[in-house]
Image (cartoon, rainbow, N blue to C red):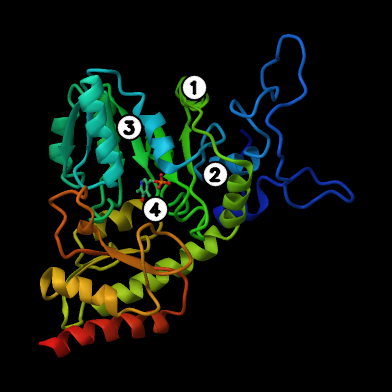
């Protein structure tokens, strides 16, 4: 793939994946509604054939994301983040060992448990920010799975050190880059073999589409991910992919604003009397701060918040908010939050009273007014 290395990521998000420039040509790519493509005889390589194998409606989005992740290949778009994760985890052979963070997306943990039950995969859970423990666990592993920052605990991994140890042990490294986005972290350039995204979140960014993507530099790995998508039919629709591209065009602005809002809210929360603890890698005292400052180009816009007063207080905060949306998912323009342990499937080591806040792009004073009033209300209850 051709990179114009002189263009900054914010420019790539806007300029890449456009139709060829010609007098009277459309500025935006079309949505092509066709399940099949004109073809006869023995198909040549790269030729469009059938809409489960490849479709031109996917290419502009795949090109932009490939350039943002600085991948040797365009991204591969999937029907959801989980479909992309399933493709990546298919690289673990039956009976192999998969090392993954004990705090990571809960459905990824569920998928790993399914691999253990059905394919005898030895699943080893680690604290991804404990580098020595991960290095010990990857010996004999087929794959190390990384989320950084983790969902929902916001632990930050020393990714270059983990990649080096995993590769020395002969293990592949897969990274779920959903929380950071490629503007903040490019794992392939830190040595990872596979990167996945829940495009549903920041990349599409408007809470109106479910979509995923996977990327690999290596020709063979890329071909295996593509083959998985074709064999399982885990493909994206043309409209969904077009919507995701439309959202992606404003990624840089959205991420910049959301990160600034999150850092300011985290700073204010850290001195509020009704707050037991707050986690955001931007805070100087946060356990992930030093690593995030060294390895990432930003601190993300997810906050972990534990109000004083336990589960009842956490639920009361959620109920008292009027601007913040009580909802699962994250990465939309609107600020939202939820108590993660309301899901029985969430990791038992996530505190019962942890609220995960996804900070959006609203005015920060409006967000603070709503949030601080909800917290002040707790104090009133005594
Ligand atoms: C939401 C999420 C996923 C799953 O993506 P879907 O698009 O919902 O399938 C995977 N990883 C992380 C970190 C997520 O937040």
Residue 258 drawn at (x, y percent)? 43, 67
User: In this picture, is 288 found above or below 334?
Assistant: above
Determine which of the numbered discs, if any, sits on residue 231 in the image. Answer: 1
| Residue under the point 24% across and 76% down | 317
The label number, if any, that marks residue 173 in the structure image: 3
Q: Is residue 142 above or below residue 253?
A: above
> Dots 1 and 2: beta carbons under 8 Å?
no
Label 2 secondary element? helix
Q: Quadrant of residue 191?
A: top left
Q: Residue placed farthest to the right in the image?
A: 23
Q: Earlier in the sequence, mark 3 or mark 1?
A: 3
Q: Is residue 144 left or right of residue 15?
A: left
Residue at 23% from the left image edge and 82% from the top image edge: 375
Residue 314's place in the image compared with 346, above or below, is below
Marks 4/2: CA–CA distance: 14 Å
Q: Is mark 1 within 8 Å of ligand 1?
A: no
Q: Are marks 3 and 1 in contact (CB under 8 Å)?
A: no
State how far apart marks 3 and 1 are (Cα). Answer: 23 Å
Q: Which residue is mark 2?
A: 65
Query: How far apart are the alpha carbons under marks 1 and 2?
Result: 23 Å
Whichever of labels 1 and 2 marks the residue nearer the N terminus, that label is 2
């Amino acid at each position: 793939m051709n990179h114009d290395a002189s263009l900054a990521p914010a420019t790539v998000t806007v300029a890449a994946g456009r139709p060829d420039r010609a007098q009277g040509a459309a500025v935006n790519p079309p949505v092509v509604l066709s399940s099949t493509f004109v073809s006869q005889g023995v198909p040549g390589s790269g030729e469009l054939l059938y809409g489960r194998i490849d479709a031109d409606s996917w290419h502009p989005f795949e090109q932009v994301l490939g350039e943002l992740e600085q991948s040797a290949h365009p991204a591969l778009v999937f029907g959801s983040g989980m479909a992309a994760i399933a493709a990546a985890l298919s690289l673990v052979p039956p009976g192999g060992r998969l090392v993954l963070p004990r705090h990571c997306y809960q459905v990824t943990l569920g998928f790993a448990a399914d691999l253990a039950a059905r394919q005898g995969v030895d699943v080893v859970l680690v604290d991804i920010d404990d580098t020595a423990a991960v290095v010990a666990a990857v010996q004999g592993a087929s794959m190390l799975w990384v989320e950084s920052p983790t969902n929902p605990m916001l632990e930050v991994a020393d990714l270059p050190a983990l990649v080096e140890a995993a590769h020395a042990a002969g293990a592949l490294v897969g990274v779920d880059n959903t929380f950071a986005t490629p503007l903040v972290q490019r794992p392939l350039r830190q040595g990872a073999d596979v990167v996945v995204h829940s495009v549903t979140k920041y990349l599409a960014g408007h809470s109106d589409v479910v979509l995923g993507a996977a990327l690999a530099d290596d020709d063979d790995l890329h071909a295996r991910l593509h083959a998985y998508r074709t064999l399982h039919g885990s493909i994206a629709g043309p409209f969904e992919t077009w919507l995701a591209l439309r959202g992606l065009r404003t990624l840089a602005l959205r991420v910049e604003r959301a990160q600034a809002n999150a850092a300011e809210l985290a700073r204010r929360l850290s001195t509020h009397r009704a707050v037991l603890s707050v986690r955001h890698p931007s805070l100087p005292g946060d356990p992930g701060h030093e690593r995030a400052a060294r390895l990432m180009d930003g601190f993300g816009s997810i906050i972990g918040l534990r109000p004083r007063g336990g589960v009842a207080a956490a639920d009361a905060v959620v109920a008292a908010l009027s601007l913040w949306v009580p909802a699962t998912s994250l990465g939309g323009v609107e600020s939202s939050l939820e108590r993660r342990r309301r899901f029985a499937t969430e990791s038992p080591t996530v505190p019962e009273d942890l609220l995960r806040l996804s900070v959006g792009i609203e005015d920060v004073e409006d967000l603070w007014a709503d949030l601080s009033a909800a917290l002040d209300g707790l104090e009133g209850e005594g």
